[in-house]
Amino acid sequence: MENKTTGTSVGASKLKEFLGACGRFLQKYSYFFAKIGISLVTLALSVIVLFFLLRMIPGDIVELYALKLQNQQGITFDRAYELAAQLLNYDPNENIFQAFGRYVGGLFRGELGNSYLETGVSANSLIATRLPWTLFISSVSLFISFFIGIAVGGFVAQKRKGIANKVASGYIAVSGSVPDYLIALILVIVFAYQLRWFPAQNNYDAFAVTPGFNLPFLLNVLYYAFLPILSYTIVQTGNWILHMRGSCIGVLGEDYILAARARGLGERLIRRKYMKKNALLPLVTQFGVSFGALFGGATLMESIFNYPGIGLEISNRIISKDYMVVQGLIFFSAAMVILVNLVVDLIYPLVDPRVRRG
Amino acid sequence: MPEEKNFKTFCAALGRFLREEGDAFVRGLKKFFSNGKTIVGFSIILFFVLVAIFGPLIFPYDSNTDMANSYLAPSWLHPFGTDWLGRDVFRQVIAGTGSVLEIAFYSAIFTVVIGTVLGIVSGYLGGWVDKIIMAITNIFLSIPSFPIYLLLAAIVTISTPISLAVIISVWSWAGLCRSIRVQIMSLKERDFIQICTVMHMSKAHIIFKELMPNVFSYIAINFVMAMRNAIMASVGIMLVGLAAYDPTNWGAIINAARTKGLMNVKNIYILLYPLVCIIVFQIATLLLSNGLDETLNPRLKVL
């Protein structure tokens, strides 16, 4: 399309050449640009959806906040109202377009939303303090379950008649049908409250260790994170086994596996060199999507373990009606999902060149 | 006698019609129950449905407190024991079955209807409609669902199963919509649809008479899956303490026992029964959907 721009002036041949090069560049990487465009549109639309969800909230939180400010600082109500609208970045008296502009402006300045219950607390500060914990437990368990799932799934796919497959199928069925937070609840009841092997809440013992890079602290963190990681792993492993087994069974039907068998290669070698590598490709996308979903935290899981992550923060602040912060946190997790999905989409053609051509 | 003859032929025709329909019905049933998983899953779900309908009639739930009999151990009078206010846990669980099933059923219906309609429309019409619907679907897929359920449950006061079901289904149709769209798009290229288009059949005819029957099995399986997800979501919402309109719902019982303190072993016994019920029900739905999947899509059968 860029090639069609015809230069009217005489010395436009260079411009034409440049535009042509631009066009070729765009065409070559059209896949990437399309993906980026779709992600940006989705991000913009989710901002709009979240904004309208905020407008649906009953009651006037700005007025409540203004009353609080008025009492705290001893200023007139009008002044307090103005200040409240500024601090919360939300003024109910504006028309909807002005309010939307104000909200988007705040997002561009990096203000996700201030709390009106606690002064000095905002979605940004919560993300800074809570996200590392959420990412710690969820990414560790994601990696553990992914590797277990790949190993077991690949093994089981080759021995479909054996007892191992039956056990794996049973495990998949049970772990897939018990809601994840109920597994967490069972673990908390058994190991934390009855056997008292593990703590039932928090991320580390604030009285026994000092935060920082020292061995007792790290050990304490691992000790406190054991149950959450275990329950995440139990929940996710079945899913990975299922996907890996399905993918492997697909690969096992291919000709090159037959050829490898005909050459007399052992099953173990076939599994390692031929089957797993090809079966892993579709799982890369899945892994990326799961990783993107981590940033929102598992709301219920964290509230059952009382683990101070993003998810616990979201559910607590929804209950205490601190909607500005909730909106910021949900926007953040949606944005991370979109971003990670985009990265996966962009990386995938490098891993599997067939996608770009298709 | 012409009338008598007419009547006779009518009877014969009716008989033939009934026999044929009956045969088709019996064949359908045989096909439906040819799979072991389907039988087990279906009978467990049927059991829960019967409990939900007849249970409260046989064992009516009395919500009056009786502090003298709190924390009783299981006995013939109270098969699951009593809670901290002396109420029978067994009867609570039975009374909650209906509420859980209602939420699951309604939200499965809403989810499937929204997902199917939008999926078929966007897959069949294509063009701008498709682009707009897909953009909307993308939003719903990228904003995490559970916080939104909680947010909606806090914004809208939940007082009936239907309102909870609406909240759950509003944010859970997107995946179904996307997969139905893909199926429709591949069906659209097949010969029989092409012929219909060439014959200038109406779009309504093509959608309802040609496309719908072909994705029906997929919709049936997804109905069961939507029930699963609805139970997971509704129990989760109740577990946080939002949507506290029905104290006998399984999620509400679990939440109440949890907030009473898990240090006390007796509270654990109270939440054990609804927990087991949820797990059994979820396994049943999984078996039913897998069984249906194997019967209706024999090509997909992996093992």
Image (cartoon, helix red, strand yellow):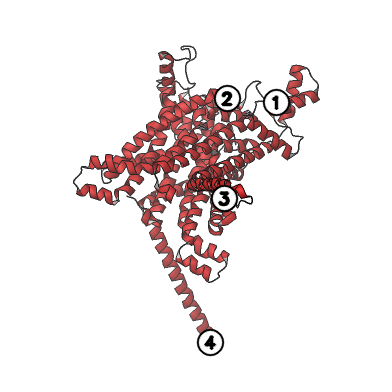
Query: Where does residue B219 sit, x and y in percent of width and height?
Result: 49, 54
Q: Chain of mark 2?
A: A
Q: Vertically, is A147 above or below B54?
A: above
Query: Where does residue A67 sit, x and y in percent of width and height?
Result: 75, 24
Q: Chain of mark 4?
A: B
The CA span between labels 4 and 2 is: 88 Å
The CA span between labels 2 and 3 is: 46 Å
Question: Depth check: B280 or A269 in front?
Answer: A269
Q: Which residue is mark 1?
A: A87
**Is label 1 on the same chain as label 4?**
no
Q: Which mark is residue A2?
A: 3
**Is label 1 on the same chain as label 2?**
yes
The CA span between labels 4 and 3 is: 82 Å
Report the amino acid beneath label 3: Glu
Report the amino acid beneath label 2: Leu
Q: Which mark is residue B2?
A: 4
> Circle 3: is it few (<14), some (14-19), or many (20+) Cα within 10 Å?
some
Report the amino acid beneath label 4: Pro
Report the amino acid beneath label 1: Leu
Does residue A297 appear anywhere in the picture?
Answer: yes
Q: Are marks 2 and 3 in contact (CB under 8 Å)?
A: no
